[in-house]
Image: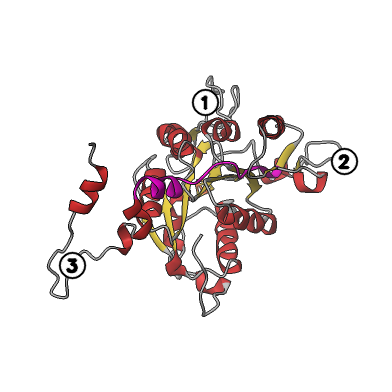
Amino acid sequence: MATATTPQPTRQDYHVEYPNDWCPGCGDFGILSAVQQALAALQLLPHQVALFGGIGCSGKAVYYLPTYGIHTLHGRVLPYATGAKLANPDLTVIAIGGDGDGLGIGAGHFVNTGRRNVDLTYILFNNAIYGLTKGQAAPTLPLGAQTKSFPEPTIQGAINPLMLALASGYTWIGRGYAYHVRHLVELIQRAIRHPGLAYLDVLQPCPTYNDLHTKDWFAGKDLAAGQARLYDLEQEGYDPVIPAGADDKMVFDKMTQCIAKAHEWGERIALGVLLENHTLSSFQERLGTRLKSYRQAPPARRTIANALGHPTTGLSALFSELAVT
Ligand code: SF4
């Protein structure tokens, strides 16, 4: 995470006057608001943050924030974010995308990014449908579900993104809900503060195409009176932290409780931090151990031209460091 400097930013510093074409009532608005509030609360200035958006309704968030930003290629948001963080470790890097983008065409990058533990935050807008292309079944829609945009129920099963994140090696795993904005602000701050790869799954109602996972459904209005579907793990005393130096048994036990919570769905859905693992080094640390020149001067800090704009890049020192003798 980048270090804050004066002047102190406010939420207003993260407001952008740009036409927003998300549908009225879309859960994306709650997530955008939470990101704005979290960045201001962390006292980060917009130029200290780089945001990368996938393809889909969610990916447009890069236009609605005044940070550095790139609307990337379909499924490729994590390679962009990884490259930016490795080039400039001082940046706070956030990747944003939908479940179709990240768990469909981008599934290979989702898994392989987990192996590296790069210090960045991936926020996945999970609405179980492809909103931008008129509501087809996305990878998190359960087998047999039929939304109003389908002629028949889906005959494909669903990916559980929390389980996939755990299996792939993400060291921080959490889940929020788009309309619980205050809770989401806290989760985003915790994800950004985590010194490794953070995956934040956000349940996001799409009122235009998904009439199954609606605001009323998440509120438990179909359940017995007083029964809540969404609950906060923290309020139940759940402890997700695996401290540095933890033994194998503790790691196993914490991962087992994460699996149990990740599998809950239907009448009880857990929100909060499911796993916070401090036993692994970040990819930047591993790279710095391998390449001394990276630690001293990552790419963004290297001088590449003289005062006249002539290139001064010399690769001989790097080549000699990499030489196999
Ligand atoms: Fe939101 Fe769905 Fe509209 Fe996309 S199609 S902007 S996800 S409500």
- Magenta residues span 271-291
Ligand 1 lies under 8 Å from the Cβ of mark 2? no
Q: Is 256 positioned to the left or the right of 166 in the image? A: right
Q: Which residue is mark 3?
A: 305
Which amino acid, mark 1? Pro
Secondary structure beneath label 1:
loop
Which amino acid, mark 2? Ala
- Residue 45 vs residue 72, the one in the foreground: 45
Marks 1/2 in contact by CB < 8 Å: the verdict is: no
Residue at left offset 62%, top offset 55%: 190
| Numbered mark located on residue 225 in the image | 2
Closer to the camera: disc 1 or disc 2?
2
Q: Tell me the crowding category of disc 3: few under 14, some 14 to 19, or many 20 or more residues within 10 angstroms, Cα based.
A: few
- Residue 4 vs residue 22, the one in the foreground: 4
Q: Which residue is mark 1?
A: 151
Q: CA distance from mark 3 to mark 2?
A: 68 Å
Q: Tell me the crowding category of disc 1: few under 14, some 14 to 19, or many 20 or more residues within 10 angstroms, Cα based.
A: few
Q: CA distance from mark 3 to mark 1?
A: 59 Å
Residue 55 visible somewhere in the drawing: no
Q: Is 142 positioned to the left or the right of 70 in the image? A: right
Quarter of the image with the C terminus in it: top left
Assess whether residue 279 is covered by the magenta stretch: yes
Q: Earlier in the sequence, mark 3 or mark 1?
A: 1
Q: Is residue 77 above or below residue 29?
A: above
